[in-house]
Image (tube, helix red, strand yellow):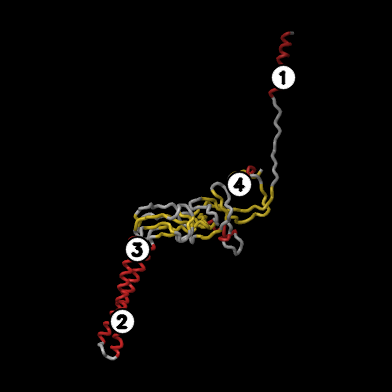
Amino acid sequence: PSLIATTLIFSLALAACGEKTVAPPAPAVVEVVTVAQRDVPIYMEWIGSLDGNVNAVIRPQVTGYLIKQNYREGDLVKQGQPLFEIDPRTFEAAVEEAKGLRAQQVARFETTKANLARIKPLAAVNAVSQKDLDDATGSHLSAKAQLEAAEASLKTAKLNLGFTKITSPVTGIAGIAKAQIGDLLSPSMQTELTTVSVVDPVKVYFNISEREYLKMVGSLAEGKRPGQTPLDLFLVDGSQYPHQGKVAVFNRQVDTTTGTFKVAALFPNPDNILRPGQYGKVRATMSVDKGALLVPQRAVTEIQGKYLVA
């Protein structure tokens, strides 16, 4: 009897343990999302590099020692504003010398002119020979030519003197100077003095494939040129630039090494925030898909190039 009781108690214990280890199946959870329907713009995007609309490379046009820098690097400079000054003393002396030579030629010209004026009436009455008239005429013409050469030399000397003050040809941002006070400058030097970039508007270069170019042209409304498509610019921090741009230049041909067109777009830059050398993402809205159905990205599965939606 005790053996039967022990076996019964052990069997009940096993049954109790079995009931605790078997858990009921978890209920299935299905997440449901309502499909949204709205108009969706279709974009095309490219990576672009920023550059100045005009990049004026500043170089010396005469040889001399740099004695002054008249601008602060990185600041906005105006057209005609002096940037550098070269020692002008040699060129001032050249101007004075050219003035003296011109004065000599003026005196000679006036003398030959007076001689010719006296000989002409005498030759008319055969008071002097024809040779005398020819000699006077030749001397006058020679003096006139030499005077013109002296005046040209004086203009050249004054022009070289003016080149000692190097000014900005455009209004823009001036870069860091690559020459120091006391350097000997010359037109043949390898490096420029600085560069002034016009950054309003700023130019953005990007490359589009031939397929994208054809798609861009085909997606536009009839009679509308590709350059009229508004462009958005996104900076490296992800922020959208507040001003829209437009295409300014399509290169005339496809680059055979890359198979792409080079495109230049212009963006307004009134606060000079954008600078040459920056990068950004250019986006163009090519069309709008009316009444498109939108589902979450996580609901889309790609299998062998086909997209499935659960």
The numbered mark, 3 or 4, whose residue comes first in the sequence reads 3
Give the residue at x 30% y 90%. Answer: 124
The numbered mark, 3 or 2, whose residue comes first in the sequence reads 3
Q: Mark 4 points at which residue?
A: 306
The numbered mark, 4 or 1, whose residue comes first in the sequence reads 1
- Give the amino acid at mark 1: Ala
Among the 4 quarters of the image, the one containing residue 31: top right
Q: Which mark is residue 92?
A: 3
Q: Name the residue under label 2.
A: 114
Which element type, helix, strand or loop, lies under badge 3? helix
The numbered mark, 2 or 1, whose residue comes first in the sequence reads 1
Q: Mark 1 points at which residue?
A: 16
Q: Label 3 to label 4, Cα distance in Å?
A: 80 Å
Can residue 259 be seen? no
Q: Label 2 to label 1, Cα distance in Å?
A: 144 Å
- Give the amino acid at mark 3: Glu
Give the residue at x 30% y 70%. Answer: 101
